[in-house]
């Protein structure tokens, strides 16, 4: 029992009106698609449109800013599997991100002594290697609970960064130049994917996000996803019900790691340069901030969270001295006013949920709780 | 770098400046002798006719911009701000003297990390008004974004990125305003084993590219004189284990290959532990911040630097202090010099990117810190490494390493 | 074929090995490293107490505690500066004067750190508690508050560390097994242990301490029993802040250049690691964890080389948690009794 579990009813009403989400949830799938397609098209067009107020210029190139935002979004989706779905507090997610980036650099950069492979071949390799790291980290640590897990993962993230520094072939601060990129050339023969044009990278990243969202969505509705939610909500109960919690926690770690590795590899490709500088605890915290801010456990929420976390410093790039002050204040204020995250996690039936709700209630979906990750207050979710 | 010292040095320098060759000869005889009694070499007088950003005051040009790209709020922000202030001073002096030619200095914060640099640099090259760039300060970010400047044909002059590899990328727009690590490392080794007479030297490096690169060339130069080596991390403040290791090795000199932020506590902790070896630092350590920060240990410190002594910069030092309230820091004079070169180009009517690039490529002139003339790779044609020491709490010129 | 060859060449790293074991140096400097490690470790321990107390009561990792610490370091620096001392050579002062000035700096640091901690609780955490926010949300406001506190220092004082000022030279007093023990080391270790005993006594023997333990055990029942929970929480943050302020003075005596806007971060992470090592929520665990971490870091550095310091610290943490999943002494604040 913790202090945070004292009655929150006044502040977070269990059945607050959510007209937009109700409307959305009650739409048939087809109509949902009809709304989604133009929205997705608009998202794809953003870097080309460069809308005036949203634009990060003149401080920062807008298409590249959009790529960074989308990269954060991909990271947030991956971390959301671990933190939001399975309820495992991971402060070292940047470690997986770093592994992905380094695998990409090692197999494509001329600074590496390894055999060179094309970008698109290395991308899945990066994911597999990161998944192996997920198992390596998860096996010993996932028996720990709560905050002990948090500090161990933080330590793991730091160890990865420090190894990149200390282990000579990983070149520490010197880094790897000319990291590979996907094939394709512009009309004038220059590579289509280069580090000064964010648009192709953004499109690639958004496409991958959509793919990952599909996969993760299906995973969520599967046996694995239900097991994660059970672990998140009450690990002891899940274990007593015969759920092999340890196994499913490792699965969560590995799935999350794969997405982290993917985004790390993309990051390395877009930048064209990898050294050990940006894989620190602060970056890890920012990843976590994206998830919590958006609403852990809610895929759309964490996308919004990632947009806030990645976008605010870039938007205020032109006033360099104050941008992190603004960012810090924004984090505090947003959390005080939306403690459940921008979009909270939803408690709902997962498998055949749509049909079940239709039959029981006559409408698409019942949202029963706003509280994201209120795992220490299981009684209030009924 | 205060006035009292400067006037004192000025008298010395004026005497020595009569003949540069004489000074060189004296240095040679001095090297290998006993440490502190080595004669102080005179600063070259040539710095007196250094390029002045004010020019003749008659320059005419349409309003145009140059940019500073580097860390403002991020890792090692202090170094970035030294550079920014140096460049800003040059631009302000130029604009004040030349009402007919107003140049704007745009500022871009890369936070000193490679992941922000491409976005910033792309923004810079896509801003048509910017025709020259002072930066990028660090080697990592330069590696990540240098190709973007190159493909846009936008000239960049870096006051501080010293990784030798940077000039081997074939970038046509990269110009380095100081010697790279390959020139300083061997010189530092020579200084320690020669002039300081050290038989045993410990080399401690940080984890920056600058620190590791410089340490490698220094260790190579030291050969068998290398008694012990160790590594520390940027932002580390407690060095007790390294200090104990150095103490056990009992060296005659300790070379710290890194920046002053870590060097100051490290030197002090060495001193506290009773290590009496000479403390030698490179240009990243040669800063008033080190001298004041290291307390009692500073008196025992020497520096090597690929920069000509700033003795005759009274005008620059005073103006800098008036503008910022602080003494010029590491790389401030370099940034001032490099910005001045860009301004000279603009004054002479080179207000397009290709024209300014061409101007810098063929530039041949004296600056405050050194003579600027680049080879086809963007390295200075001739670099000199000077040594400095601390006297009465001030960094003063020692000798030139030949 | 070439893949396996490449991978083995990666592991075997261009001839030289990137990690070496220097047993000779380890043995030679064993006692010097032990003593220095204990001194630095007691600074870790004092900061760790702040993490542990707050965690014990709120089950909250107060990530902004490192900023509470660094504000104390700035208070020390400004006290010295205000007394008319300037960076440079250490002043030669009569002993009584040094003691007086150091005590003054201690008070200033404790006041500033304690005040910062309480303010932090009021602004960043209390509104969330009132709204019954989930636990993780506190982590994010802590990160936000950490940014804000750092950036205030950055905007105000700039990116450079304050140039070191100190009133007391770090001079050897006597030797243990051939290793110097300096005055600063003795002051740090003795004062830290005394402070920790005092906190232990406070928590275990006073009425306020009983309130803290009651809230740590069961906040709802404690409230029903008439404990003012909000006041207990404020008190907990205050004690944590006071201890961080004391740690800041010892830190600045050892490392006068320590006041920089990001200077608390790494130390904060280490102190938190120390708290977890000993068993988070456990007062004596924080002491044990801090000392152990300080010593282990120094041993690791002399054995493997300076760059392995942090790796050693985190590997140690993982190993110990494998064997003792709740830390070495692993009990909660509520259960801690003398």
Image (cartoon, coloured by chain):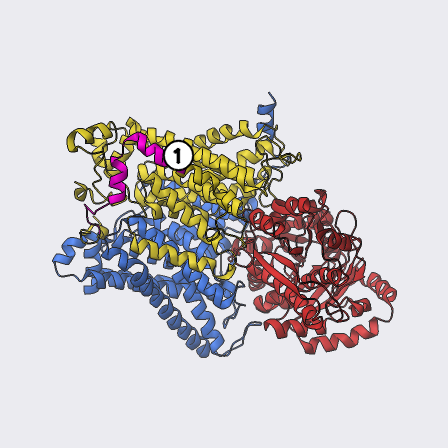
Chain colours: A yellow, B red, C blue
Which of the 4 quarters of the picture holds residue A29? top left
- Label 1 marks which chain's residue? A
- Whether C297 is drawn above or below A251: the answer is below
Q: Position of residue B209 (x, y in %)?
A: 62, 48
* Residue at 70 percent of width and 51 percent of height: B181
Q: Assess whether residue B334 is covered by the magenta stretch.
A: no
Considering the numbered disc 1 on the image, is that residue within a helix, a strand or a loop? helix
Question: Main SS type for the magenta part?
Answer: helix
Q: Position of residue B143 (x, y in %)?
A: 63, 45
- Where's the N terminus of chain C, which quadrant? top right
Residue C12 visible: no
* Residue at 30 percent of width and 58 percent of height: C125
Relative placement, left or right, of C44 versus B221 is left
Q: Assess whether residue A31 is covered by the magenta stretch.
A: yes
The front one of B298 and B49 is B49
Q: Position of residue B180 (x, y in %)?
A: 71, 51
The front one of C170 and A4 is A4
Q: How many marks?
A: 1
Residue pointed to by mark 1? A37
The front one of B182 and C193 is B182
Magenta residues span A12-38
Which of the 4 quarters of the picture holds residue A83? top left
Q: Position of residue B4 (x, y in %)?
A: 69, 78
- Where's the C terminus of chain C, which quadrant? bottom left
* Residue at 46 percent of width and 65 percent of height: C153
Residue A248 visible: yes
């Amino acid at each position: 029992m913790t202090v945070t579990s004292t009655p929150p009813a006044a502040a977070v009403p269990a059945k607050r009106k959510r007209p937009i989400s109700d409307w959305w949830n009650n739409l048939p799938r087809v109509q949902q698609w009809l709304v989604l397609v133009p929205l997705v098209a608009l998202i794809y067009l953003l870097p080309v449109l460069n809308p005036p107020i949203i634009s990060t210029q003149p401080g920062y190139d807008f298409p590249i800013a959009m790529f960074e935002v989308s990269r954060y979004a991909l990271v947030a989706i991956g971390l959301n599997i671990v933190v939001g779905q399975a309820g495992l507090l991971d402060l070292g997610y940047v470690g997986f991100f770093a592994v992905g980036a380094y695998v990409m650099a090692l197999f494509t950069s001329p600074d590496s002594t390894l055999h060179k492979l094309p970008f698109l071949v290395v991308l899945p390799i990066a994911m597999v290697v990161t998944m192996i790291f997920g198992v390596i980290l998860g096996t010993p640590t996932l028996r720990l609970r709560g905050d002990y897990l948090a500090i161990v993962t933080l330590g793991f993230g730091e160890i990865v960064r420090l190894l990149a520094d200390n282990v000579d072939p990983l070149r520490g601060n010197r880094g790897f130049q000319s990291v590979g990129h996907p094939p394709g050339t512009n009309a004038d023969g220059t590579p289509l994917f280069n580090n000064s044009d964010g648009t192709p990278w953004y499109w690639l990243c958004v496409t991958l996000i959509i793919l990952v969202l599909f996969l993760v969505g299906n995973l969520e509705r599967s046996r694995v996803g239900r097991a994660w939610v059970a672990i998140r909500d009450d690990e002891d109960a899940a274990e007593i019900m015969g759920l092999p919690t340890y196994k499913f926690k490792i699965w969560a770690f590995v799935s999350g790691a794969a997405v982290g590795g993917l985004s790390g590899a993309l990051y390395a490709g877009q930048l064209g340069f990898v050294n050990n500088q940006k894989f620190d605890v602060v970056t890890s915290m920012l990843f976590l901030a994206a998830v919590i801010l958006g609403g852990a456990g809610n895929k759309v929420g964490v996308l919004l969270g990632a947009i806030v976390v990645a976008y605010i410093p870039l938007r205020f790039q032109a006033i360099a001295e104050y941008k992190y002050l603004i960012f810090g204040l924004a984090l505090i204020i947003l959390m005080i006013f939306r403690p459940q995250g921008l979009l909270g996690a939803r408690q709902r039936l997962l498998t055949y949920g749509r049909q079940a709700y239709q039959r029981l209630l006559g409408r698409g979906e019942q949202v029963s709780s706003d509280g994201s990750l209120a795992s220490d207050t299981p009684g209030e979710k009924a | 770098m205060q006035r009292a010292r400067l006037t004192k040095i000025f008298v010395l320098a004026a005497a020595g400046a009569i003949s540069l060759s004489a000074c060189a000869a004296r240095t040679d005889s001095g090297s290998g002798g006993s440490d502190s009694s080595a004669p102080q070499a005179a600063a070259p007088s040539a710095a007196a006719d250094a390029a002045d950003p004010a020019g003749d005051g008659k320059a005419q040009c349409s309003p145009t911009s140059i940019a500073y790209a580097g860390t403002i709020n991020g890792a090692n922000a202090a170094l970035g701000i030294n550079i920014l202030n140096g460049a800003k001073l040059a631009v302000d002096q130029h604009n004040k003297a030349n009402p007919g030619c107003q140049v704007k200095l745009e500022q871009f914060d890369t936070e000193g990390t490679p992941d922000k640099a491409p976005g910033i640099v792309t923004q810079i090259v896509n801003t048509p008004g910017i025709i020259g760039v002072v930066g990028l300060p660090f080697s990592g970010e330069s590696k990540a974004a240098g190709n973007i400047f190159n493909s846009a044909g936008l000239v960049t002059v870096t006051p501080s990125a010293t990784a030798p590899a940077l000039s081997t990328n074939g970038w046509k727009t990269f110009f380095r305003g100081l010697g790279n690590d390959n020139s300083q490392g061997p010189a530092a080794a020579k200084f320690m084993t020669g002039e300081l007479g050290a038989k045993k030297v410990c080399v401690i490096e940080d984890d920056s590219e600058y620190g590791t690169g410089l340490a490698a060339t220094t260790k190579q130069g030291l050969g068998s004189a290398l008694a012990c080596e160790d590594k520390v991390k940027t932002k580390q403040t407690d060095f007790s284990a390294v200090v104990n290791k150095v103490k056990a090795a009992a060296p005659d000199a300790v070379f710290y290959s890194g920046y002053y932020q870590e060097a100051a506590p490290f030197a002090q902790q060495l001193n506290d532990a009773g290590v009496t070896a000479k403390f030698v630092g490179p240009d990243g350590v040669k800063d008033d911040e080190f001298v004041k920060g290291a307390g009692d240990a500073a008196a025992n410190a020497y520096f090597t630097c690929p920069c000509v002594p700033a003795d005759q910069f009274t005008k620059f030092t005073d103006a800098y202090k008036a503008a910022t309230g602080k003494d010029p820091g590491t790389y401030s004079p370099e940034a001032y010099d490099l910005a001045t070169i860009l301004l000279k180009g603009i004054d002479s009517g080179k207000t397009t990117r290709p024209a300014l690039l061409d101007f810098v490529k063929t530039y041949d002139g004296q600056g405050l810190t050194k003579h600027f003339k680049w080879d086809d790779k963007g390295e200075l044609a001739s670099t000199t490494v000077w040594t400095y020491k601390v006297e009465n709490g001030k960094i003063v010129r020692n000798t030139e390493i030949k | 074929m070439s893949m396996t060859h490449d991978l083995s060449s990666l592991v075997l790293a261009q001839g030289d090995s990137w990690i070496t074991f220097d047993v000779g140096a380890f043995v030679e400097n064993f006692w010097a490293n032990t003593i220095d490690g204990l001194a630095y470790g007691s600074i870790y321990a004092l900061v760790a107490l702040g993490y542990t107390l707050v965690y014990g009561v709120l089950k909250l990792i107060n990530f902004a505690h490192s900023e509470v610490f660094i504000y104390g370091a700035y208070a020390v620096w400004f006290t010295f500066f205000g007394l008319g001392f300037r960076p440079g050579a250490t002043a030669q002062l009569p002993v009584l004067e040094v003691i007086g000035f150091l005590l003054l700096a201690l008070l200033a640091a404790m006041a500033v750190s304690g005040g910062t901690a309480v303010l932090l609780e009021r602004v960043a955490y209390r509104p969330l508690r009132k709204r019954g926010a989930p636990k993780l949300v506190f982590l994010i406001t802590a990160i936000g508050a950490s940014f804000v506190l750092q950036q205030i220092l950055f905007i105000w004082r700039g990116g450079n560390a304050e140039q070191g000022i100190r009133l007391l030279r770090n001079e050897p007093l006597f030797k243990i097994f051939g290793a110097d023990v300096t005055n600063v080391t003795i002051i740090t270790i003795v004062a830290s242990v005394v402070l920790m005993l005092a906190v232990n006594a406070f928590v275990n023997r006073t009425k306020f301490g009983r309130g803290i333990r009651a809230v740590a055990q069961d906040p709802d029942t404690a409230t029903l029993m008439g404990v003012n929970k909000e006041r207990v929480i404020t008190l907990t943050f205050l004690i944590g802040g006071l201890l961080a302020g004391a740690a800041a003075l010892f830190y600045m005596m050892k490392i006068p250049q320590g006041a920089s806007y990001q200077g608390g971060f790494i130390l904060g992470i280490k102190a938190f690691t120390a708290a977890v090592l000993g068993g988070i929520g456990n007062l004596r665990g924080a002491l044990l964890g801090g000392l152990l971490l300080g010593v282990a870091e120094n041993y690791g550095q002399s054995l493997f080389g300076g760059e392995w310091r942090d790796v050693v610290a985190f590997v140690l943490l993982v190993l110990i948690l494998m064997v003792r999943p709740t830390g070495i002494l692993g009990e909660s604040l509520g259960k801690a009794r003398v």
